[in-house]
Image (tube, grey):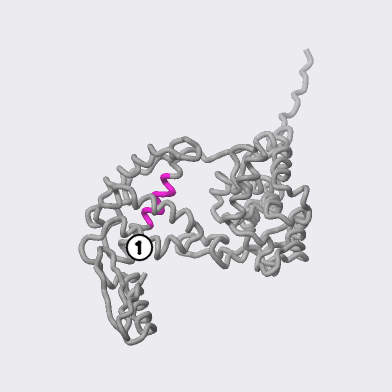
Amino acid sequence: MASFESRGNSVRAIVRLPGGKKVTQTFDTQAQAERWAAQVERKKELGVLKPSGNVTVGQLFEAYLDAVAVNTDSAKWNKLRIMKWILDPLAAKGVRDIVTHDINDWIARRLKDVNAATGETISPATVNRELNLMSGAFTYGVKDRQWLEVNPCHGARRPEKGRARKRPLLSPDEIRAITTATGFDRDPQLRTITARVGACFLLALETGMRSGEILRVRPLDYWREKRTLHVAAIEQGGRKGAKSGRVSLDPSRNVPLTLRAMELLDALLASMPPDQPYIVGITDAQRDANWRKALKKSGVEELTFHDTKHEAATRLAGFLDVLDLSHAIGTKDVRLLRDTYYNVDAHRSAQKLPDRLTPAAPATALQPA
């Protein structure tokens, strides 16, 4: 960010470049100084202004955080991860000196770290997600800033992916325990934030919508007469876009509603907080904090809010064909739908089968003796 200094009747604008270099200029007015600083900052973002010396990996991470990572749905977690990397020995290396071997060393160290919340070592899936973010930072350094020529994450030895998480479907008792813990049953007017979180949980079970999508439903998105909810995906936190080859897919979709889903939406709409653009009327942070408290109080274990998408997909699969289901829950990759969001139940499938698939052989006539 640019800074400004008053010098008598003039104003000095200062813009810092990665590597420690500063560019400055003095103007007669604050407005002139701010316009010039904005132009220089823009050139810096485009990589037109080159830093002096060899930029460190930590400086690249900081630049990527400010320009890209904070503008995504995962901004909160991106910032936490990148700030942790800046304290890692990797950050002290120059971007021109970094090689794939350094990334492999970081992966090995990260796999030995312990999660402070669970006391368990970091999972390979977590390291892979972090490596994707790190690779994005280096790609930004290659393409946007031109600070290095090759992304060192390419060719790194990624941890082997474990099996997909397969939590059993929630039982009626578990669902009841969570709704009781949120106070949903005791507060039908949904006056408390926790009760509204309970309504969001039940709505997610009926629709397969992500938390961010539910929290950004506007009154105009609820098409009650058509039993449909429109996911507009117009801002950060809504449904993410997707690509199939070179074709960008429209992230918006229309979600079919059960009567139970409509009851929940009606209750949320009737109790919608004033001066709020969204029906639920709570923030992502409020939903997350109150969900965690309610889940701990309920005694239900090994459950995340996102597991509701898995629940809904499995239940909806009994009524929708695979294409309708993929559009309903917003998963364009049918393989992901099959391997992650659908909980196959061979016993349930067996109940749908006929007595036999092959025709019975004709009875053989008895021959006289």
Q: In the image, 187: left or right of 280?
A: right
Which image quarter: residue 221? bottom right
Q: Residue furthest front?
A: 8
The count of marks equals 1
Tell me where residue 313 appears, x and y as whole percent. 64, 48
| Part of the protein shown in magenta | 127-136
| Camera-side residue of 23 and 123 | 23
Q: In the image, 343: left or right of 41?
A: right
| Camera-side residue of 175 and 59 | 59
Q: In the image, 44: left or right of 278?
A: left
Instruction: Report the quarter where the C terminus lies.
Output: top right
Tell me where residue 301 appears, x and y as whole percent. 61, 37
134 in magenta: yes
| Camera-side residue of 258 and 266 | 266
Magenta segment, principal secondary structure? helix
Q: Residue furthest left?
A: 53
Tell me where residue 245 appears, x and y as whole percent. 46, 60
Tell me where residue 349 appears, x and y as whole percent. 68, 38
Say if 103 sits above or below 269 in the image: above
Which image quarter: residue 179? top right
Q: Amino acid at mark 1?
A: Ala
Q: Residue at x 43, y 56 (%)?
A: 79
Q: Residue at x 22, y 66 (%)?
A: 52
85 in magenta: no
| Camera-side residue of 319 and 157 | 157
Which element carries disc 1, helix, strand or loop? Answer: helix
Q: Residue at x 38, y 57 (%)?
A: 136
Q: In the image, 136: left or right of 193?
A: left
Q: Which residue is mark 1?
A: 63
